[in-house]
Amino acid sequence: MSIDPNREPGEVRREEATAVHETSAGTPEPRVEREELVEQGAGMERRESVVRDRSGEEHRQILTNDVAGSQWMWLSKLSSVVWLIIGVIEVLIGLRVILRAIAANPANDFARFVYSASAPFLSPFFGLTGTPSAGGAVLEVPSLVAMAVYFLIGWLIVSVIWLAERPLTHSATRYDRNRL
């Protein structure tokens, strides 16, 4: 169920349906006696129904679908994934800068892992500027530039994600109130 794009904001649309469900043995199951769809503006849908349970009691159920809220959640999760990937890249490059600055032993397994894992992300930046060194310690300026560029790329991607305006998914909450 989706909101009609041709509908004016704030317009309410009502539909009614009646259904009865029974098992093959003829015993009544919970059934919908009357259902009414109320579509509201601002990305909200609401469906109200009266349901009769097995004991014969009627319950009024209200199902609310917040399209805008579900879109926000989806975009928020996507943005979190982008920031996670950028964060991992930033940490790898940052560790490399620290290890090179303190003249860590490149034969060490941890240092070798950090250098090899960060190398693909730094290859476009090597040769960009000089790398000052003193006594074995190296300040990799291209790595610092790469960290700034990757942060800006992450920010740009997340900004574009949040520009999305169309609903992508639906979420629903259910409220069941016993009818007197």
Image (cartoon, rainbow, N blue to C red):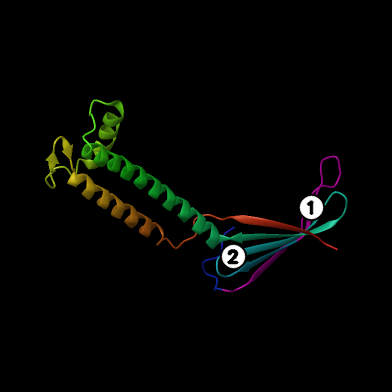
Majority SS type along the magenta span: loop
Question: Label 2 sits on what residue type?
Answer: Met
Residue visible at 54% across and 60% down?
69
Q: Is residue 31 magenta?
A: yes
Determine whether 102 is above or below 74 in the image: above
Determine whether 10 is above or below 53 in the image: below
Residue 126 falls in which quadrant of the image?
Answer: top left
Which one is earlier in the sequence, the residue at label 1 or at label 2? 1
x, y percentage for residue 95? 29, 39
Q: Which residues are magenta?
A: 10-34
Question: Label 1 sits on what residue type?
Answer: Arg
- Local crowd size for mark 1, using a 10 Å CA cut-off: few (<14), some (14–19), many (≥20): some
Residue visible at 18% across and 46% down?
142
Seen in the image, is 74 located left or right of residue 50? left
Residue visible at 51% across and 55% down?
73
x, y percentage for residue 101? 22, 40
* Count of numbered circles in the view: 2
- Nearer to us of marks 1 and 2 is 2
Marks 1 and 2, Cα distance to the nearest angstrom?
Answer: 25 Å
x, y percentage for residue 104? 24, 32
Q: Is residue 83 magenta?
A: no
The local secondary structure at tag 2 comes to strand
Image quarter hosting the C terminus: bottom right
Tell me the residue that label 2 is attached to.
Answer: 44
Tell me the residue that label 1 is attached to.
Answer: 31
x, y percentage for residue 52? 82, 55
